[in-house]
Image: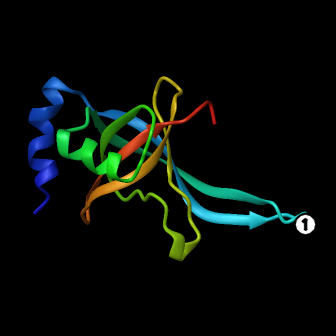
Amino acid sequence: MDLNALVSGAIGTVNPPLTVQIKISTGYVTGADGSRTPTYTTQSVSAQIQALTYNDIQQANGLNIQGVRRKMYVEGDVEGLVRADNKGGDLVTMPDGTVWKVALVTEHWPDWTSCIITLQDNS
């Protein structure tokens, strides 16, 4: 049962969903000089952006995640750092052009993901 789909209509009356661009990390390519360049695939998804809860703040503080943070509920799958797959955090571009990095996945379900995102410096 997709509980997010059940409540998203009610939440959307107060906090409408946004269409965001997500650059999903596919790993990296290594240049001749040994430098690594991240690679991504891009897709548009619907997302709810909210403030962090107290528990989210405590979890992010425990990981020493600094900066401007928000919680995002997104239809689909996003990931933070996955060392085993050599992938970095996915990037989220908001309608206003700001870029946010998926720093921590807090809930992962078949149809949706909840994560903490951190504002990037014009990357």
Q: Is residue 110 above or below residue 18?
A: below
Regarding mark 1 in the picture, which secondary structure is present there? Answer: loop
> Residue, x 54% and y 35% (percent of image)?
120
Horizontal relation, residue 31 to residue 49: left or right: right
* Residue 81, horizontal then vertical, whole percent: 49, 61
Q: Is residue 116 above or below residue 70?
A: below
Horizontal relation, residue 33 to residue 122: left or right: right
The residue under label 1 is 32
> Residue, x 50% and y 52% (percent of image)?
90
Q: Residue 8, located in which quarter of the rendered image? A: top left
Horizontal relation, residue 32 to residue 67: left or right: right
* Residue 96, horizontal then vertical, whole percent: 48, 23
- Crowding near the residue tagged with mark 1, few <14, some 14–19, many ≥20 C-alpha atoms within 10 Å: few
Q: Nearer the viewer, residue 61 or 75?
A: 61
Q: Nearer the viewer, residue 31 or 53?
A: 53
**Considering the image in quadrants, where does the N terminus appear?**
bottom left
Picture mark count = 1
Horizontal relation, residue 21 to residue 3: left or right: right
Chosen colour scheme: rainbow
> Residue, x 58% and y 56% (percent of image)?
41
Q: Residue placed farthest to the bottom in the image?
A: 84
**Considering the image in quadrants, where does the C terminus appear?**
top right
> Residue, x 53% and y 70% (percent of image)?
83
* Residue 99, horizontal then vertical, whole percent: 53, 35
* Residue 121, horizontal then vertical, whole percent: 59, 31
Amino acid, disc 1: Ala
